[in-house]
Image: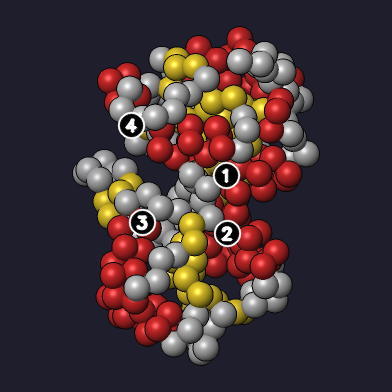
């Protein structure tokens, strides 16, 4: 295997890597501080499309993690970037929260339920049967189907919650149309993120807690990958996948000295 170039830029997942159920993971504050002090390009990524980067900045700040707004990249931003590239100034019927609707407004999209170019599905705290029915009918009438991410469940203090991927499957069953997912594990999210900070995949690394999204997307984007064991993946589960991360570490604390 060819020797990898030194890491100059870092991308890291948020939930399971920096925080867990609203509590910072030990070492996360030191890692973010080291990145900021070093001046290296970095991004904190999340497949959750509920919050805007400003919202996430404030939430992380309350936990003692000082991540600037322009260093936060969400699946909503990746989705908006994709739509802006594909069909600038288009229209969309959106199921989602402020993180997604704001991202689409910022690229000049008009949100409508009248003959939209796209149905865009994202994360929301309350999936409405009425909204899902509307989405099904619009897709059947010709709207293209886009979803922010394929995660089937999301974390909560009470246990797993149905997420975008599960609702997308329901709509697919009703329409026969599969969505295009813009978020992880689509390497598009990584590449657009790297472009946003002027970084190159050959000298970048991705840190995550999931093999099927974080590690897969990082690997397919050509980056080094680090799997932390503070989230959803256990060492035994790693062996079930046909690919491996570049390195497995216990937590983000083990990577502070790599920056």
Q: Locate residue 106 relative to residue 115 in the image: left or right.
A: right
Earlier sequence position, callout 4 versus callout 1:
1
Residue 66 position (above or below residue 51): above
Q: Name the residue that disc number 1 marks.
A: 187
Q: Name the residue that disc number 4 marks.
A: 232
Which x, y percent locates residue 74? 55, 49
Mark 3, secondary structure of its residue: helix
Q: Locate residue 202 relative to residue 136 in the image: left or right.
A: right
Q: From mark 2 to mark 4, how far is it between C-alphas?
A: 25 Å
Earlier sequence position, callout 4 versus callout 3:
3
User: Can residue 28 be seen in this snapshot?
Assistant: no
The residue mark sitting in front, 4 or 1, is 1
Tell me the quarter of the image containing the C terminus: top right
Which mark, residue 79? 2
Which x, y percent locates residue 96? 44, 65
Residue 115 position (above or below residue 23): below
Mark 1, secondary structure of its residue: helix
Which mark, residue 134? none
Earlier sequence position, callout 2 versus callout 3:
2
């Amino acid at each position: 295997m060819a020797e990898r170039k030194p890491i100059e830029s870092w991308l890291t997942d948020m939930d399971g890597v920096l925080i867990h159920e609203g509590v910072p993971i030990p070492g996360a504050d030191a890692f973010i501080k080291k990145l900021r002090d070093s001046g290296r390009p970095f991004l904190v990524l999340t497949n959750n499309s509920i919050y805007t980067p400003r919202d996430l900045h404030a939430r992380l700040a309350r936990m003692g993690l000082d991540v600037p707004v322009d260093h936060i990249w969400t699946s909503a931003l990746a989705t908006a970037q994709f739509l802006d590239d594909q069909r600038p100034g288009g229209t969309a019927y959106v199921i989602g929260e402020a993180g997604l609707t704001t991202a689409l407004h910022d690229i000049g999209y008009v949100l409508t339920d009248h003959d939209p170019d796209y149905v865009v599905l994202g994360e929301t705290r309350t999936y409405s049967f009425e909204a899902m029915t509307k989405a099904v009918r619009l897709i059947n009438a010709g709207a293209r189907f886009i979803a922010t991410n394929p995660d089937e469940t999301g974390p909560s203090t009470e246990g797993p919650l149905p997420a975008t991927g599960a609702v997308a499957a329901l709509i697919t069953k009703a329409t026969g149309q599969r969505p295009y997912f813009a978020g992880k594990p689509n390497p598009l999210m990584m590449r657009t993120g790297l472009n946003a900070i002027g970084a190159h995949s050959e000298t970048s690394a991705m840190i995550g807690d999931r093999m099927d999204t974080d590690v897969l997307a990082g690997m397919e984007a050509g980056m080094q990958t680090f799997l932390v064991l503070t989230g959803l993946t256990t060492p035994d589960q790693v062996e079930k996948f046909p690919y491996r991360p570049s390195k497995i570490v216990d937590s983000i604390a083990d990577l502070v000295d790599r920056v």
